[in-house]
Image (spheres, rainbow, N blue to C red):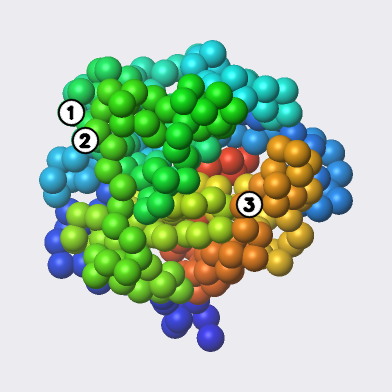
Amino acid sequence: MSAAQNRMLPRQISDANSYVEITPFETGRMVTPCATLVEDAQGSSTATSWRFLLRHPNTDTNFWFDMGISHDLSVYPPLIQSLHKHFKPIPSQRSIEHDTRSLNIDSESIKHVIISHGHWDHLHPLPPAFSNCNMIVGAGSSSHCSPGFPRNPDSKFDGRIWDSELRSFPLAELPPISSPVWNPLGPFPHAYDFFADGSFYLIDAPGHMEGNLAALARVKTKKGEWKWVLLGGDCAHCNLFTYWPDAPFGKMPRALFPSGSLHECGATARKTIAWIAECKGNEGNDLFVWYAHGDFLEGAWEL
């Protein structure tokens, strides 16, 4: 059966404005052996770290999905700065505020910063200019990441995000997947229709770490065609896994990564990757899969 005959995601829309606009921004690069991504792979990988600015026309809402790497590496807790020796981050010179203003959007108009998960290369404290904004995280993230540094000097999580006494901005945690706001969508057991119009779904994507999220966004191409973009965060760390979902995970030193890989639970992460691969296989060119560290963003030239 062809992809066109076996669609998994909704095709029909009742409102022409039920979509989102997406602009990707490169926040830096990390250099690491390919074998950290795929077992026994040769060579080195220079992985881009992306953040995505989105706009929802129906509500005129501007929001970010992930923050990427901070332009100032000194903001991170000491344990994270020690990890930089392994990942060798090369940050962008642009702050998230600069990227916001580059689209003629006022920082004060940003309503949400949605974080795929709590790792350092996806979030840092919100800038004061995001004065009308909250940070949204997956269920279980706060307990998993608390107490952060400095209350726990050995924590790899930043207390200015996770500790309420230190945080200077609102943080909202999504309800657990037992809540009725979560419903199946295609191969994904739990999806949250964020704007309640079918334009943007948050996807429960377990395995990489507690509270891990992906997102599905309905977009309109330059030609006026409806397509989907899956913002995959760290569900996988390179595009290869979309097409070879059973490729072996790379090896990491257990002193730094107790599971021995970049995923906290490899077996569960594998299920999430399988859902993404199944969705891509059925949707074909009508679904673009964008991971946070993909070396390219497929189909971006169409948007």
Give residue 145's position: percent from left, percent from top.
47, 40
Query: Going from the N terminus, do you reach mark 2 or mark 3 first?
Result: 2
Under circle 1, the secondary element is: loop
Mark number, residue 140: none
Residue drawn at point x = 70 percent, y = 47 percent: 258
Comparing marks 2 and 3, which lies closer to the viewer? Answer: 3
Label 3: how many residues lie within 10 Å, few (<14), some (14-19) or many (20+)? many
Proximity of marks 2 and 3: CB atoms separated by less than 8 Å: no
Proximity of marks 2 and 1: CB atoms separated by less than 8 Å: yes
Query: Going from the N terminus, do you reach mark 1 or mark 3 first?
Result: 1
Q: Circle 3 sits on which residue?
A: 263
In this picture, is 99 found above or below 274?
above
The Cα–Cα distance between marks 1 and 3, rounded to whole angstroms, is 33 Å
Residue drawn at point x = 43 percent, y = 70 percent: 188
Residue drawn at point x = 42 percent, y = 45 percent: 143
Q: Circle 1 sits on which residue?
A: 132
Residue 89 position by quadrant: top right
